[in-house]
Amino acid sequence: MQIPLELDHEPSFALEDFIVSETNNIAFETVKSWPDWEYHVAALIGPEASGKSHLAISWAKKSNATVFTKSKIPSVEEIEHLGNIVLEDVYLAPSDEQSLFHLINWSKENSRYLLLTSRDEPTRWEISLPDLKSRLSLVQVANIQSPDDQLLMILLAKMFTDRQLNIDLSIINFMIPRMERSFSAARELVAAIDAKALSQKKAITQKIAKECLIEMKML
């Protein structure tokens, strides 16, 4: 069975193209339900390559938000002319606490919404500022769990499709029970298989997939 390859090479970040399963449904519904949030700040929490950026970019387009990626927490002066805000890959340094506190207050006072993405829930961040800790305890949190078999199968198929690669479904079924069960591992494995098949000028085979699994110490 061949998986048809009709998508563009560049991955789509449209909300309708997000792969939904039991492991990420809460995060998907959180983005989809805006602006009917319980609080004006929400957080998408999950491991690397779990789809947080996909959902954050989708929400930014939907809400006309400005995205700040892997950067210092912006000051109120920097964003006072903006609307809704996305802070991606938040890693809060002690020097950022006041900025985030003021940003949360500013967003509430100006009827703006703030979406955070991070690997850890805000209540687990090491924070010394009591007022910020109190604000973050109110944040609507949506966790993304490790992928199940069904999601891994669809995810791998989409990753190969995004690279315009033909892949037999039996090869994906061979990979799933043997690979590390994480989004980042799936991305790295697909990239390795693509590179090896290209270097050998061959179609992707189970042998190539097995070699990559061994080289990545998954088998």
Image (cartoon, rainbow, N blue to C red):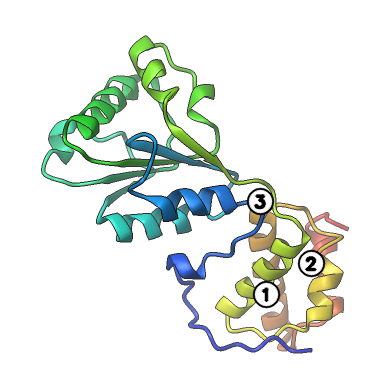
From the viewer's side, name the closer residue of 60 and 138: 138
From the viewer's side, name the closer residue of 127 and 217: 127
Gap in angstroms between the C-alphas marked 3 and 1: 18 Å
Residue at figure coordinates x 34%, y 21% from the top left: 97
Gap in angstroms between the C-alphas marked 3 and 2: 26 Å
The residue identified by callout 2 is: 212
Mark toward the viewer: 2 or 1:
1
Q: Which of marks 3 and 2 is nearer the N terminus?
A: 3
Mark toward the viewer: 3 or 2:
3
Mark toward the viewer: 3 or 1:
3
Where in the figure is residue 73, as x and y percent of width and height?
30, 33
Query: Of helix, strand and loop, which one carries label 3?
Result: loop
The residue identified by callout 3 is: 23
* Amino acid type, mark 2: Cys
Residue at figure coordinates x 72%, y 76% from the top left: 196
Query: Of helix, strand and loop, which one carries label 1?
Result: helix
* Amino acid type, mark 3: Thr
Where in the figure is residue 25, as x and y percent of width and height?
58, 53
Gap in angstroms between the C-alphas marked 2 and 1: 17 Å
Where in the figure is residue 78, as x and y percent of width and height?
16, 38
**Looking at the image, residue 159 lies above or below residue 125:** below
Cβ atoms at labels 2 and 1 below 8 Å apart: no
